[in-house]
Amino acid sequence: MINNLSITYDPKDFEDRIYHSWEEKGYFRPKVDPNKKPYSIVLPPPNITGQLHMGHALDHTLQDVLIRWKRMQGYETLWQPGTDHASIATEVKVVEKIKEEEGLTKQDVGREGFLQRAWKWKEEYGGRIVEQMKKLGDSCDWSRERFTMDQVLNDAVIEVFLQLYNKGLIYRGNRIINWCPECKTSLSDAEVEHEDKNGFFWHINYPVVGMEGKYVEIATTRPETMLGDTAVAVNPTDERYKDLIGKTLMLPLMNREIPVIADDYVDSEFGTGAVKITPAHDPNDFEVGLRHNLPQLVVMNDDATINEKGGKYAGLDRYAARKEVVKDLEELGLLVKVKDHTHSVGQCYRCNTVVEPLTSLQWFVKMEPLAKPAIEAVRNGEIKFVPERFSKVYLHWLENIRDWCISRQLWWGHRIPAYYCQDCGEVIVSKEAPNSCKKCKGSSFKQDEDVLDTWFSSALWPFSTLGWPKKTEELEYFYPTDVLVTGYDIIFFWVVRMAFSGLEFMKEVPFKHVFMHGIVRDAEGRKMSKSLGNGIDPLEIINQYGADALRFTLLTGNSPGNDMRFHVEKLEASRNFANKLWNATRFVLMNLDVDNIDRASVEANFTTADHWIMSRMNQLIKEVTENMDRFELGLAAQKLYDFIWSEYCDWYIELTKPRLYGENQENRKTVQYTLTYILENILKLLHPFMPFITEEIWGTLATVKGDVIVSPWPQYNEGEVNYKAEEEMNLIMGIIKSIRNVKAEMNVAPSRKAKMAVLPSKAEVGEIIEGAKQYFFTLANISEIQLVDSKEEIPADSVSIVAEGAEIFLPLEDLIDFEKEIERLEKEKQKLEGEIKRVVGKLSNEGFLKKAPEKLIEEEREKQTKYQQMLDTVLERLASLKGKA
RNA sequence: GGGCAAUUAACUCAGCUGGUAGAGUGUCUCCUUGACGUGGAGGAAGUCAGGGGUUCGAGUCCCUUAUUGCCCACCA
C-alpha cells in the first residue's frame, strides 16, 4: 500500500482526523502496569474562564513533547488534564454576565442563585479550552479529566483543611490582610502586585497634650489613615524624642488622645523619626500595635469608604477623605509641608485596584512548619529546577514566608468547612454540619460564609487528581509526577504550594523536576494582553499554518526559562520546514517500487554516502536523546531541522539520484532501503515535536506497522557510526562546493559542463574522488574526471581548487579570466595564511605544548601540515598564473 | 535596598561540561535540474556591551562598569 501525498502540505487536511484516530485508539490512556515504568505530568489546569492563548500553547507543547517522547520510550505515560474553577476570575465574569443579561447584582440573585448560574457557566464555557487543546495536539488522558470542584477533589480539599486544622496549622484570627475594595475580598500576599507610584509625603504636627505649642511632626503617605491612629512611635534611642516617650498627643481632627511609644521598628533617619501608628491599616503598625497592646481601629468599610469610626469623614471614599483630611489639617495650621515621594503601592492582581491593608477576621495557614520540608526538598535536590536559577526564587520566597490567608469573601469556590454554634459561638470544623455543639449542646449552626483561596485546591492537584485521599492504584503508580512544566510567573502561587502540600500529605515531593519557561511576547517584546490588543490567537495560527508549525516555532530558538518573541516569519520558516519534509517524503514514495526491503539483502551494496548518512543518523539519535534528557528541547528540535533539511534533503537525496535513476536494480534497491530507513527514523525523532505531519507521513509508508505515536524511540547504534565514511563525504562535499563556488565566482553558468582533472597528493584521495565521480557529474556538472600525476597534462588555462590531499583543475578555456582567478587565489592565500598563523602561534606556545591535551596538539600539528601544503599549492599556482597574465 | 536575567551578523535568537563563532529571516548573484519556488546553488556580513582577571587557551569561568528588562522587600 503506497499512498500519495498531495503536492503541497496542507495541515488542515489531516490534523483533526489524526487527532481523533489517536483518541479512538486510546493512545493517551495509560494503564497501571507494574511491569512498565510510569511517567507522569500534571497539566497546570487552565482557568475555566480562559481561552487558549500563546502561553498555554507554549506550556502545553513542552509537556506534549515530553509525554510523547516518553511514551515512545516505552513508559506508561500519564498526562493528567483538567481545569481550575479560578475563584475570583470566574466570579467576576459571572457577576458581569448576570448584570448584563438580567440587570441584577450578586446579592439580588443570592448565594444559591449565583452558584446555579456559575455552574451553568462552567458547563457552557468550561470545556472550550479542552477542545482548543486538542487542536494543538495535546495527548492528555481525557478520560481522567478533572475539575478542581469535582466531588473527589472537593473531598481532598476538605480533608486537607481538617487535617491542617487538627494539627493546628490552620487557624482563624483577626490579623492584617490585603483587602481589595473592588472584589470585596481578602487576598493573599502573593495576590498583591506592587508598583512604584508617585505620591506625596505629608508632614503633620500632632500637638503634645499639656504642653502648649509643642508638637510632634510625623510624616505619612496615606493621611486618611490617621483617623485610625492609636499611637505615635519613636525610636527609643532617639534623643530628640526621649522626653516625649510616655506622653500623650492629641490626634488632630479626631481629638482623641494617643500615646507616644518607643519601638525599635522606627528608623530615626527616615522622615521625621516619628511614626503615626495605625494598627488596623498597616502591616508594620499592626505588629507594633501587638507589641504595645494598642487598640485596632478599622476606619474603612469593605468598599474603602470611611466608616462611622472616621467621624465627619464617614461615607467618603478613601481618596476623597484624603483630600478632606489634608485640607482640614491645612486650615488648622497643622500641615507642615508636602513633599514628593514615590512609594510602592499594592494592587489586586485581578482588577488592579489599590489594595487596602486592614485587620479582619480570616482563616490562615501557618506556614513555617510547612515551608521547612519544602525548602529542604529543593536544597537536597529531590526537586530540581530547570534552569537551576529558579530554585533561588523559590527558596527566597519560602524562607521569608508569612502565614497564608486562605479565606475569601466570595461564593464561587470550596466553602470553608467551619460551623458556628448559634447559641454559644463555638467553632466546629468538620466535613458536614454537626448535630450538636460539643460545648453547649446547642443544635443550631451556621456554616462559614467564605470560600477558600483558589490556589488552596490547585496546591493539591498532583495527588487530588489521582484520587487522594483514597489510596487508588493510580496514585500509587503515578505519584510523584516526573516533571512540572510551568511559567516562572507562577512559582509562588502554585509551585511552592504544591511542594509543601505534597510533602505534607503524601510525604513525598509532588514532582522531581520543575521545568520553567518564560512568557511569549509579541514581536515588539511586549507582553500580550487584552488591553493592548496585541494578543495572537493560537487557534488562528493553527488554522493558517498548522499546529505542527506553531509547536515548532514555540520550541526552537529559545532557551529554558527565557521569554520569547513571537514572529510570523519564524512561523513561516517552521511551516516551510514541514513542507520540506512533506516533499522529501513524496520523493521517496515516488521512487519506491518494492514494498519491503530486507537490510541483509542490500547492506553489502552500501556506498560511502549510505554509510555516511547512517552514521550521521545515529549520532543524531544520540544527541537528540541527550538533549531531551536535559530538557533542551529547543536544541533537539534545531538539530532535527538541520539534519533533515541540510543533510537528508540537500545532500543525501541528491546523492541517491544517480543510483535511483540508473539501470542497476541492486543499487536502486539499496537506495530505496536507506532512504526509507532514514525517513522512518526522522519521523520518529520528529514526532514529539511535530506529531501530526509525522503521523500522516508515517501512514503512507508501506514499510512500517502501526502508528508512529506508539513506535519505539530510535536507539543509538554505535556500530553504525562510521568516521571514515564521514571524512570521505566531507571531502567530496567540500570539493563539490568549491567547484560550484568557483563557477559562480568566475561567472560560469552552473549548467555549463566542465571537465575536471585531479592531481592527488595522497593516492587514496584520488581513489575516493574516482569512486564518487557520479556525484561530481550530477551535483557539480562535471562531464569527465581525469586523474593525473603531473601538471604537465593539465591545460594551462585551468582554474584550480586546492583541497586537502589533492589539487583539482577545471579547464574553462575561453571563459577563464586570469585577473579574476588571481584575485580568487589571493583570497584563498590570505585565508590559509591566517589559519597557519593561528596554528603556528598555538604550536610555538610552550604552555600549550605542555598543558593542552595530547590529542589536541596532534590535531593542530596535522592541521599545520595540511594548511601548509595547501598554501604551497596555491602559491605555486599563483606564480604560474602571474607569469601568464 | 536586595536578587535574577539579557547585552553575539541588518533583525530575532541558539551556542552543553572553556579548544579555529552558528541558525532563521533579510540582503546580493545565479538557477523553469524529472520531491519541494513554502524550492535549489553560491556569496557578503560579528574586536561575542566596555574594562580587568584566571588559564597554554575565554562568547563560555571570576570580578567590575554601563544599558535594558523582570522579581522580591514593612522604611512610615
Image (cartoon, rainbow, N blue to C red):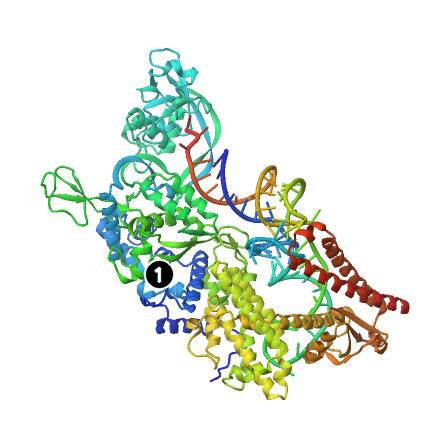
Q: Residue A469, position in %: x, y?
A: 25, 55
Q: Residue A541, position in %: x, y?
A: 48, 63
Residue A879 appears in the picture as rendered? yes
Q: Chain of mark 1?
A: A
Nearer to me, A183 or A617: A617
Nearer to me, A56 or A533: A56
Residue found at the very far left of the displayed protein = A441
Q: How many marks?
A: 1
Question: Residue drawn at (14%, 40%), measured in percent from left and top?
Answer: A422
Residue A353 appears in the picture as rendered? no
Q: Image check: A774 left or right of A247?
A: right
Q: Residue A548, position in %: x, y?
A: 48, 67
Q: Image check: A652 left or right of A762?
A: left
For disc 1, the marked residue is: A81
A235 lies above or below A537: above
A835 lies above or below A205: below
Residue A72 lies in quadrant: bottom left
Please rate how many residues cluster around mark 1, counting C-alpha atoms within 10 Å: few if below 14, some from 14 to 19, many from 20.
Answer: many
A647 lies above or below A487: below
Nearer to me, A720 or A186: A720
Element on which disc 1 rests: loop
Residue A663 lies in quadrant: bottom right
Q: Image check: A151 left or right of A389?
A: left
Question: Residue drawn at (65%, 72%), measured in percent from left and top?
Answer: A729
Going by the numbered disc 1, the residue's amino acid type is Pro
